[in-house]
Amino acid sequence: MSRSPRSIRLLRGGAERRRGIYILPNLFTTATIFLGVFAIIRAGSGDFLTAAVCIVIAHVSDGLDGRIARLTNTTSDFGVEYDSLADLVAFGVAPGILAYNWALGPWGHWGWLAASLYVTCGALRLARFNTQIAHVEKKSFIGLPIPAAADMVAATVLLYFFFGGEGETSKHVLLLLMIYGLALLMVSNIRYYSFKDIDWRAQQPFYTLVGVVILVMFVVAQPQILLFCAMVVYVASGPVGWVRQRVRRRQSHRDRELRRASSGAPGGDGA
């Protein structure tokens, strides 16, 4: 007896539900949500330093869940969707509330609009990533990744407290512009390096080990300064690369025009 397409879909859906979910990678995703919620609570209580630290740790947890899923071959559609929801909480809502309570409140409407735009653009960035994940090269991201934007906010807060700041900031226009800029970069078409093509298991030159050791020393000695500088370089790398690409295209276009003009010019002394 033949089955209808609807009954076939129902049978497949039941089989997927009975298959269950993978525990280990989703535990790290759950930890990311917990850290994001705790960051929101601490930001609302005025403990901005703890909130920033939670966001940074959440990024580590978010990176581990995907790597563990790939290493243990436990990737799933459920895990992808769950990870996106966790990212929105930990790297969208939490940094938005942290930024507003820490620096954007004195700006009134412009402040809460900036925080709202940041969260909205983060959600759009995640939705676009999920729909384009099968068609985009792994070497780069389109738009600033939302964890990187959250790290930029957290690193700024950590640097502020490292240099002796306490509580809320005064009315600095650069912080307001930074939140607007991060929001727009997330939904832009500017490409960012993804670091996914690095083979950490392959043999590397000797000086690579020396560089890693020096980097670890800086992390241990001055983590706030190193994190802030690293995030500034990464966030700026996208627009800088975009400008360089456009300059190269214009230069290439000019070179072609010059070659075309020189090849079409009359030669000799025109006897």
Image (cartoon, rainbow, N blue to C red):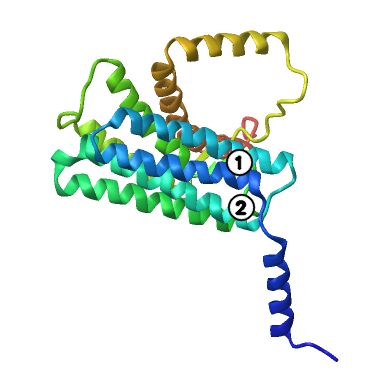
Q: Is residue 15 above or below residue 73?
A: below
Residue 79 vs 152, above or below: the answer is below
Disc 1: which residue = 65
Which label's residue is closer to the chain start, 2 or 1? 1
User: Front-most of 218 and 50?
Assistant: 50
Q: Residue at x 48, y 53 (%)?
A: 85
Quadrant of residue 198 within the rendered picture: top right
Q: Is residue 144 visible?
A: no
Point out the residue furthest to the bottom here.
1
- Amino acid bearing label 1: Asp
Q: CA distance from mark 2 to mark 1?
A: 9 Å
Compared across the picture, whether 232 is left or right of 210 comes to left
Identify the secondary structure beneath mark 2: helix
Q: Is residue 145 left or right of residue 98?
A: right
Looking at the rendering, in which quadrant would you find the C terminus? Answer: top right
Q: Which residue does the numbered mark 2 point to in the structure image?
A: 79
Residue type at mark 2 is Gly
Q: Nearer the viewer, residue 145 or 246?
A: 145
**Left or right: residue 187 compared with residue 27:** left
Secondary structure of the residue carrying numbered label 1:
helix
